[in-house]
Amino acid sequence: MPSTPADDEAWRGNALPLLNEIRHALDRLLASGETTVIDLGALPMGPQDEAELLAALGTGEVDATINAGGPSSVRETAFHGVWLVTHRNETGETQARFIEVAFVPELLMSQREDVADSAKALSEQLREEQNIRK
Amino acid sequence: MAIDGPTIAEVLRQQGISRRGFLKFCATTASLMALPPSMVPAIAAALQHARRPSVIWLSFQECTGCTESLTRSHSPSIEGLILEQISLDYHHTLQAASGTAAEAAREAAMRENAGKYLLVVDGSIPLGNAGFSTIAGISNLDMLKETAAGAAAVIAVGTCAAYGGIPAAQPNPTGAVPVSAIIKDKPVLNVPGCPPIPVVITGVLAHFLTFGSLPELDALGRPKAFYGESIHDRCYRRPFYDQGKFAETFDDEGARKGWCLFKLGCKGPVTYNACATTKWNQGVSFPIQSGHGCIGCSEPGFWDAGPFYKALSMPIGPAKAAIGAAAVAGLAAGAAVALRNRSAKKSAQAAHQKVTIDDLEKSK
Amino acid sequence: MTALELLTWARGTGLSLALAICAFGILLRLFEIFSLGRKADLSPPRDASPGSGWRTIVSRSLPPPGLFKRSPVTYIGGYVFHIGFAITLFFFVPHIELVRGLTGLSWPGLPMQVVDISAVAAILALFAVLASRLMNPVKRFLSGFQDYLAWLLTLLPLLTGYLAFHHVVADYTLMLALHVLSVELLLVALPFTKLFHTVSVFVSRWYNGDIFGRKGVAS
């Protein structure tokens, strides 16, 4: 990349406002429980901005992988409640990246429809097994 | 072709994709359509009812760059997923059938999905000699009119289809015009760019697929979600413009530090597109990040809007010659006026009559 | 015609035409004025006052004693406008690029914020002097159509430039096209209205100073 800056002046420009937005989102989460999702693909990011942002957010306690239509990673940053969600497809290519400010990211939770399916599946499985034992 | 087949949500479920996977699909689709993440529930709700639309793709005076752009998005990706969800019934570059069989597929799709299919066009249409560009012996103009008649909407992909592009550049030898110059009775959506960003093409298709309608358009028929802001406004180098820090050449210190490329002819301020945020090659980079100014490929008049390497505020006409000629004319005219003034002065002096005390006394 | 096509015309044919008319007009009028000449003044000078013309060039920019207090708007407004306008015109980087495109000459520009403040100051000053022109009965009597026209033609480039820079009212492309067109209007009118003072101001000051000097009036 020919345009890599020799020094870091003004390259912080685009990461700082985002960090401020995250700060406000944390306040909202505490005050009203409202979650915030920021699409990183919709923001102007320079080559250094993203590295800067990720460095500033750091790494936290939780690191989860969701295997649904490709491995998505859900990682808590060093700031509790600030999550980095990266959606990948089956071949591991990044499709979308979000910052989610929430107590638990939506996708980590089991979905009602899936739970209903599972309840049905489990009872079916149990019935079969119990029938065999009889 | 299965307009009345299963909905997209049903297809995904049949493929064993969980609700969680479906929500992930909705989230990436929202990002793809440049919609805010808060729209995910609306997308999920819409996809419960959305069915696979039939798509007919016509290529006229074009270079296949738009199709290249679309297919270069690695598969299986979100683009791939979208393409699996639509039924691409005719695309003479991508389809296996050729000749009569290909045309038969187009006619069948038009018949079976009359009034519901989506027509995608890349390339401009020549209004000069019809022989400049034909498919299966049918002129581009006839094929466009015939196919558009039963379409729900027309999507003009690429600058050629949207605004005329390179074929319409001066002196426009084929009399090339954009789709919107011919199709007046259908919604025409423009996705300009040379080529357009792949995910912008698929994003528009995804919008139609999801909501069954076209996204909100600007005055030039472009979806606002992608073309609402200029490259300059979303450029990560914008702070340098504001600070007055500019690269003067492509290899000076400013260029190495990634300063603003305005002086090197960047057309970012007058170009409306999503390159600065969506970027290219799966979000790797875009022209300005790679050190070259924007050339304004997604704007009307692309190729006729002045040189690529002249700053936007520089004159692009024969200004110097005009000033030179005008200066000579000004001097000549000035000399003529001076001569006239001189002769007026001289004749005034000649006509001057001296008045003496005696004359005044007499007139008493 | 789209906004970009309008801008392309303004940057191309429009600008060439406007610059040509401006150059033609300036040379025509300068030639006319200088070729008129002055009648030889046969009377001996009242006072030997060498350099009176040159001193007047500077001294006319300073308020005479007492006048500053009596018409502060004229002086402050005049200063703020002219300095603000000059900074905006000569130190905004895109403007320097325009000059470089025409002449090859260039110089360092100022940060956009400085230019922004200068432009706002110049616009406010223009409105202040207009208000003073309308409210002061003497100024109002002395003002004709041409004075208001000159005011408008000066305001338009500043205003459209400001709106374009801040992306308000219309989109940037259209506003930039209107900005360039308004400048072209100013260029065309410049040689044939009182705006010609941009070229003639120091010449006429020198003349006045020199003549007054000969008549014994200190500059």
Image (cartoon, coloured by chain):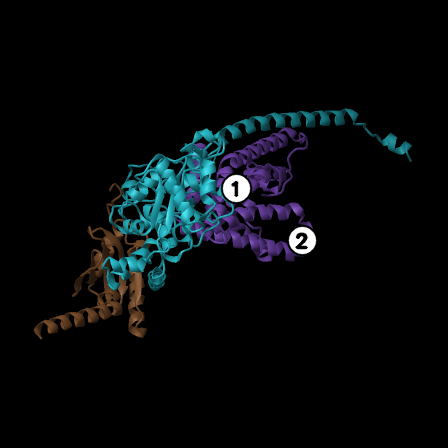
Chain colours: A brown, B cyan, C purple
Please name the residue shown 31% across and 56% down the image: B29
Q: Quadrant of residue A1?
A: top left
Find the distance from the CA under tag 2 to the CA under tag 1. Answer: 41 Å
**Disc 2 and disc 1 in contact, CB within 8 angstroms:** no
Q: Residue furthest bottom?
A: A134
Q: Secondary structure at mark 1?
A: loop
Establish if B269 lies above or below A31: above
Type of the residue with mark 1: Met
Do the residues at pointers 2 and 1 share their chain?
yes
Nearest to the observer: residue C184 or residue C41: C184
Q: Is residue C174 rendered to the left or right of residue B237? A: right
Q: Is residue B304 visible?
A: no
Establish if B172 lies above or below B243: above
Establish if C197 lies above or below B79: above
User: Pointer 1: what residue?
Assistant: C1
Q: Is residue A5 rendered to the left or right of residue B53? A: left
Q: Mark number for residue C140?
A: 2
Counting from the top left corner in percent of width and height, residue A12 is at 28, 54
Chain holding disc 1: C
Please name the residue shown 31% across and 40% down the image: B95
Counting from the top left corner in percent of width and height, residue C202 is at 56, 39
Q: Nearer the viewer, mark 2 or mark 1?
A: 1
Counting from the top left corner in percent of width and height, residue C49 is at 58, 37
- Number of numbered discs visible in the structure rendering: 2
